[in-house]
Amino acid sequence: MGDHKHLLFAINHVFLPPQLPQAVDLNPQSEHTLCQHILTAAYEFGDALSHDEKYIWSRIPKLIEQFTDAHQGLKLSEEDILHFTKAAQSGDVLAFLIRAQNAGLVIRKEIDSVIF
């Protein structure tokens, strides 16, 4: 039954057009499973690229891993954002979902700066 629930969650959040929610369907396990499937697809896509393209694409799976790790629960804390920002290397891109504001935050870390 759990796999069926995760499949329906993926269909509603990936393939169907956005709709106003009739009820909140937030489910950390379903979101984590969806992120894991996206991560697997990102790695498989990268395997099909040329050497030069792989270098450019290599940032994407890293970003998806970070996003998946950061969003294991329903809330994202200031400490979580600081942890991932400090751990990021130059050239890394970080993505965070801020549910309370229905917004996203994208951070790019460079050698001598951080871009929001």
Image: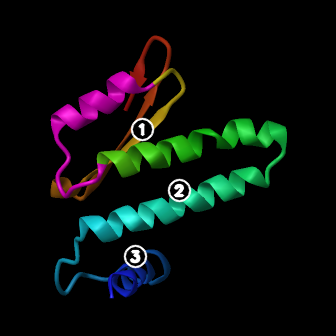
Q: Is residue 91 left or right of residue 108?
A: right
Tell me which amino acid carries mark 2.
Leu
Quadrant where the C terminus sits is top left
Q: Amino acid at mark 3?
A: His
Of the numbered discs 3 and 2, the one sitting upstream in the chain is: 3
Q: Dot 2 corresponds to which residue? A: 39
Q: Residue 97: say if magenta.
A: no
Secondary element at image label 1: strand
The secondary structure type at the circle numbered 3 is helix
- The circle on residue 13 is 3
**Looking at the image, is mark 2 or mark 1 earlier in the sequence?**
2
Mark 2 vs mark 1: in front: 2
Alpha carbons under labels 3 and 1: distance apart: 21 Å
Identity of the residue drawn at 75% across and 52% down: 47
Q: In the rendered view, tell whether residue 52 sits above or below residue 17.
A: above
Q: Is residue 90 left or right of residue 97?
A: right
List x then y, in percent, for residue 88: 43, 26
Which label's residue is closer to the chain start, 3 or 1?
Answer: 3
Residue 94's disc number: 1
Task: Pick the quarter of the image with the N terminus.
Answer: bottom left
Q: Is 13 situated above or below 55?
A: below
Residue located 28% across and 29% down the image: 83
Residue at the spot x=23%, y=82% of the render? 21
